[in-house]
Amino acid sequence: MTIKNDLLLKALRGEQVSRPPVWLMRQAGRYLPQYLEIKAKYGFFERVQTPELACEITLQPVDIIGVDAAIIFSDILVIPQAMGMEVLMDEGKGPLLPNVIKDEKDIDALNIQDIAQRLEYVSQAIWLTKKELNARVPLIGFAGAPFTILCYMIEGKGSKTFDKAKEFCLTRPDLASKLLSKITGATIDYLKAQVAAGADCVQVFDSWSGLLSPADFSTIALPYLKEIAEALSPLCPVILFPKGSWYALPELAATKASGIGIDWNIAPQMARQMAGTNITLQGNFDPTHLLLPPAQIKKEVQQMISAFGAQRYIANLGHGITPNVPVENARAFVEAVKEWKT
């Protein structure tokens, strides 16, 4: 079935578009009253693991704010969970992994066999969402990047610095490499299953790669991002989003990825200069600016598009939308992109 609004896929393929496509990271979630109603009734992993609920949540921003793509409602920590680690979610404090990876024995105990089967609830949610979308817009699948997943597996919880995870990578490079390779294999199988279920493209979130120096990024994060892009690119477009790692734009542009997500810490012109013109850039509006009056948001969005250029570009935020953003402000962001004219 031909997708009626395929702007996102056109932009990722480098085809001419009348305007940039627009979607928002974390668009299905905590700023929407309709999502909060579901959240009040069901626990976090109940929402993630029930295909009907995940589908309903995924569709909400398409219907409510009019984005050009849906992204399946899930979580990056379903991978360690499927590999046998306990993952708890305290909605006020974030994730907790009580039994962290400490040594080679712990790494060997991780089970990556039949990972797609153990995450079949995500595939079912994708299949159901594709059916309900009825070819209105593309559906994005996603996973966490190996380094970011390693951070949670070693640290056991969220952190601003992930010191234990970095120490593990630097002092035990052999074990870090073994763990990263294991996560990468599981992630590739998982993303392939998402595509088989109907995902039109996939995004890989390396939320904590910006904690790495350029030299460390090139050994601890980049090779695994590259491996995922190479494995998935024959099946669908791949967007890599290593937050904070703008210094690696030339290397990221040389992978098989179709798009690179960037945050607000780099100017659009510099990002384009570093990445070149043969890859699509996505971003990089600061979510905090969505708290400005709608008229100001629209003005800044227009300036952002002018700075990036409308071709080979996807309008998005530089990170996930925050819970305190009014729905009308999110809608103003989307409308501003739709109203864009050269």
Image (cartoon, rainbow, N blue to C red):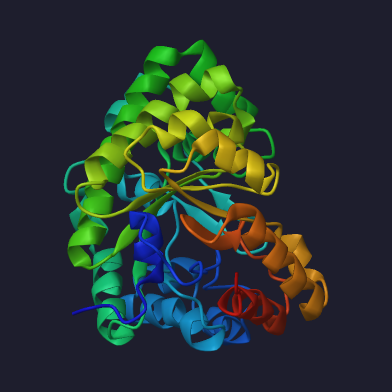
Total numbered labels placed on residues in the image:
0
Quarter where residue 106 is shown: top left
Residue 311 at least partly seen: yes
Q: Is residue 299 left or right of residue 50?
A: right
The residue located at (64%, 39%) in the rendering is 270
Name the quarter where the N terminus is drawn.
bottom left
On the image, the x and y values in percent for residue 214 come to 58, 22
Q: Position of residue 325 (x, y in %)?
A: 72, 73
Residue under the point 31% across and 82% down: 4
- Looking at the picture, how far across and down is residue 334, in whole percent? 60, 76
Furthest toward the front, the residue is: 342
Q: Residue at coordinates 69% horizontally, 44% vertically from top-left?
A: 267
Which residue is more in the foreground, 116 or 233?
A: 233
Question: Is any atom of residue 208 visible in this view?
Answer: no
Q: Nearer the viewer, residue 122 or 321?
A: 321
Above or below residue 49? Residue 293 is below
| Residue 332 location, quadrant | bottom right
User: Could you say which quadrant of the image residue 315 lies in?
Assistant: bottom right
> Looking at the image, which is closer to me, 259 or 323?
259
Q: Quadrant of the C terminus?
A: bottom right
Left or right: where does residue 274 sit relative to residue 18?
Answer: right
In the picture shown, does residue 314 fall above or below 80? below
Q: Is residue 335 left or right of residue 154?
A: right
x, y percent for residue 39: 55, 78
Residue visible at 58% across and 82% down in the picture: 40
Whether 333 is drawn above or below 266: the answer is below
